[in-house]
Image: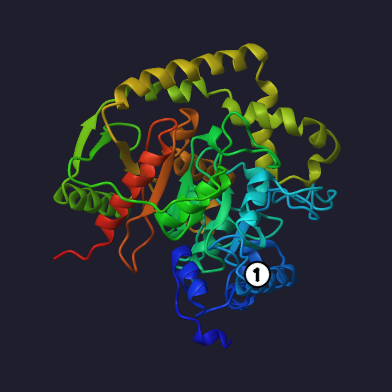
Amino acid sequence: MILASIPPMQHIADAAAALASGRISAEALVDAALDRVAAPEGEGRRTFTAVHAEAARAEARAMDALRHAGRAPGPWAGIPVTVKDLFDERGHPTPAGSAVLRDAPAAAQDAPVVARLRRQGFVVIGRTNMVEFAFSGLGVNPHYGTPLSPWDRATGRLPGGSSSGAAVAAADHMGFGGLGTDTGGSCRVPAALCGVVGYKPTARRVPITGVLPLAPSLDSVGPLARSVACCHLLDAVISGEEAPQPLHARPLAGLRLGLPRRTFLTDDIDIAVGNAFQRALSRLSAAGARIDMFDIPELDELPVVNATGGFAASEAWAWHRALIAEKASQYDPRILARIRRGERMGAADYIDLVAARARLSAAIARRTAEFDAMVTPTCPIIPPALAEVEQEAEYNRINMLLLRNTAVGNFLDRCSISLPIHRPGEAPVGLMLTGETMADAALFRTAAAVEAALSETPA
């Protein structure tokens, strides 16, 4: 099949329908994705740490043969996807965007979430780039290069992190979606900065076995893709549903969205973010949603309880301390400094942190129970230029700013999703919806309704 003849397909459902009708083959879908990865003018060389071109083509041909025989494992058999560089894949090392583990032994088996994708017939075309050991929201990687946000590539802007490659791959059609991880915003921040959808589930719903950890108390595995429905499907697969069902949006009329007055909306919000966010709220209100401002005074305590480094630094230090003792010089110095903050935390500090998390989560849950979701900007700023984070002070300031809104959901163990809300040609802006713990199904229905309302052309 001539690749130029392949019809444009945004979403997994489009590809599945084309495969079912015989209008396209899995091999052609995979070839088209690999062509985009290899395009010399594109971001593929920085977006992937490893590309499984021959294996992916072989798997696609196998899926075509199974479909022809009526034995395809599912409607998604042969659809190309990506996985972040910290998921175990049988026969491949798991470097997690680092130089330290570049030559680590190959994994003996797939991580459960990767195995679940393969069982449904998805074809993994490669491993996407990321911040070293997932410990930053910027997307910068000195070892493999930094993939650029799709917006304003002439300037060269940050993709967000740590799932930087997963977001760029989805935005640039190098696959129909991918797996990322989210410890403080690592699916939602790059989604917002690259103009795609990123989902953070309630962490316990999706296994993290076979995923190189940052902070197991906060780590979650989520998808990045070009629509809410695509993320819903991928989330259903990796959470263990054997027969994922279609997503049905809830009615917007009567939907209650809570907008916190402080923390998320402050003076440092970029004017482009503020304008896009207010425009989105106006459209949702006009479509029948009710948006109420409310107070969450407990959020003021989060910087205090995390002042010594929080779960991320303490748990990262526990995992890395032996490796650092042997190979500290091979780490990105900025990531190394973040990990080493955990060295100063004592057992009493950690126990206090665990208790504070439980107390604050319960108190905030009582305040948000009346809403279908909280609504906020995903990030308060548009994608910064790479040049802006060359100095360490600005690196740290902008990193904390990008993660400020998203990290709340991880600390509270909520489900949360970022949707693109900018107009064509504008800088990418994300709107974040955050639901209650284990209310993932309800949040997806709400997100689908919001996405539909915001995508409609105004009269």
- Give the image's coloring scheme: rainbow
| Residue 266 visible, this angle | no
Residue 273 pos. (x, y %): 32, 51
Quarter placement of the C terminus? bottom left
- Quarter of the image where one finds residue 67: bottom right
Residue 248 pos. (x, y %): 33, 51
Residue 264 pos. (x, y %): 34, 37
| Residue 308 visible, this angle | yes
The residue that appears at 29% across and 51% down in the rendered structure is 449
Determine whether 124 is above or below 113 in the image: below
Quarter placement of the N terminus? bottom right
The residue that appears at 60% across and 69% down in the rendered structure is 70
Foreground pick, 138 / 226 = 226
Foreground pick, 59 / 93 = 59
Determine whether 252 is above or below 266 in the image: below
Position of residue 48 in the picture relative to residue 417 (left or right): right
Determine whether 196 is above or below 311 in the image: below
Residue 241 pos. (x, y %): 53, 45
Position of residue 389 in the picture relative to residue 132 (left or right): left
Q: How many marks?
A: 1
Element type at mark 1 = helix
The residue that appears at 46% across and 28% down in the rendered structure is 412
Amino acid type shown at disc 1: Leu
**Furthest residue in direction front, as rendered:** 70
Label 1, on which residue?
66
Foreground pick, 128 / 64 = 64
